[in-house]
Image (spheres, rainbow, N blue to C red):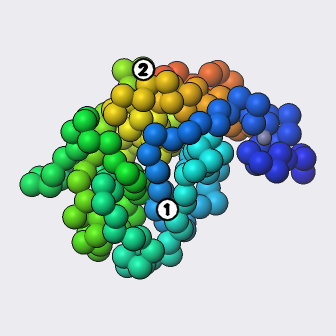
Amino acid sequence: MLPHCGRCLLPKKNCVCAHLPSINAPFQVIIVRHKKSANKASNTAFVSSLCIPSLKIIDIDHPKEVEHKIQPSLGAMLLFPPVTSKPTADRTTIPSTLYVLDGSWKQARKMYRQNVILQMMPHLSLVPRAVPPPRILTPSSPQGMSTMEAISQSFSFFGFQEEADCIHDGLCSFIEQRRLVTGIQIPIPSGMSFSQVRKLGY
Ligand SMILES: [Zn+2]
């Protein structure tokens, strides 16, 4: 087996650490991650934590656990697709903490439905940047994003474009090295996923 970097966990010859930024996040980011996603090579929550030292990841086994592991706090916000009748974020109110649900869409929806504490928070809904980064997984909806991409867009939404761009660039570097590891022969075009490029015969 190839020697791996102990930090980014890629094979040493593909180590991306030198290309990952270390940024001061403009607000606390907490990723609530379903345990099943934790060890997947496609999980960008882990890479986000390398780029944002203050970022916290809470791993949960079961959706019901969320309520016990989250402390309600003033100014907390939830990153989630639009839900009718829920308060949505405006650009002038910067959250104290942004909660990001990580996992498949099915897992995220379950976490949401089973936890009033999440439903009570103001919701932040984002769209991808005009030229989105490549993606490891195909999003489940046209406006879907990876976790790290969504964090970058949340910084951009509140006016922290420099931090957003740093995270975006770090994500692109990581995806390029993962692409080399997986043996796909061409760089992944903007907004496309590994499986979409494989289907084209690369
Ligand atoms: Zn590394």
For the question of whether residue 178 can be seen, the reply is yes
Residue at 64 percent across and 21 percent down: it is 186
Q: Is residue 131 above or below residue 88?
A: above
Residue at 61 percent across and 31 percent down: it is 170
Check disc 2 and report its element: helix, strand or loop: loop
Q: Which mark is residue 131?
A: 2
Is residue 144 left or right of 82 when viewed as pictured? Answer: right
Residue type beneath disc 2? Val
Point out residue 188 in the picture as x, y percentages from the top left corner: 57, 25
Other-residue count near label 1 (Cα within 10 Å), few / some / many at <14 / 14–19 / ≥20: many
Residue at 30 percent across and 38 percent down: it is 126
Point out residue 184 in the picture as x, y percentages from the top left corner: 67, 30
Residue at 39 percent across and 71 percent down: it is 71
Q: Which mark is residue 191?
A: none
Quarter of the image that includes the C terminus: top right
Instruction: State which tag comes first along the sequence, 2 or 1.
Output: 1
Point out residue 7 in the picture as x, y percentages from the top left corner: 77, 48
Q: Can you tell me which quadrant of the image ligand 1 is in? A: top right
Number of numbered discs on residues? 2
Q: Label 1, on which residue?
A: 33
In the displayed orientation, state which residue is furthest to the left: 85
Is residue 122 left or right of 111 when viewed as pictured? Answer: left
Point out residue 5 in the picture as x, y percentages from the top left corner: 83, 45
Whether label 2 touches label 1, CB < 8 Å: no
Q: From mark 2 to mark 1, how far is it between C-alphas?
A: 27 Å
| Residue toward you, 78 or 28 | 28
Q: Is residue 167 above or below residue 60?
A: above
Q: Is residue 88 above or below residue 58?
A: above
Other-residue count near label 2 (Cα within 10 Å), few / some / many at <14 / 14–19 / ≥20: few
Q: Is residue 67 above or below residue 109?
A: below
Residue type beneath disc 1? Arg
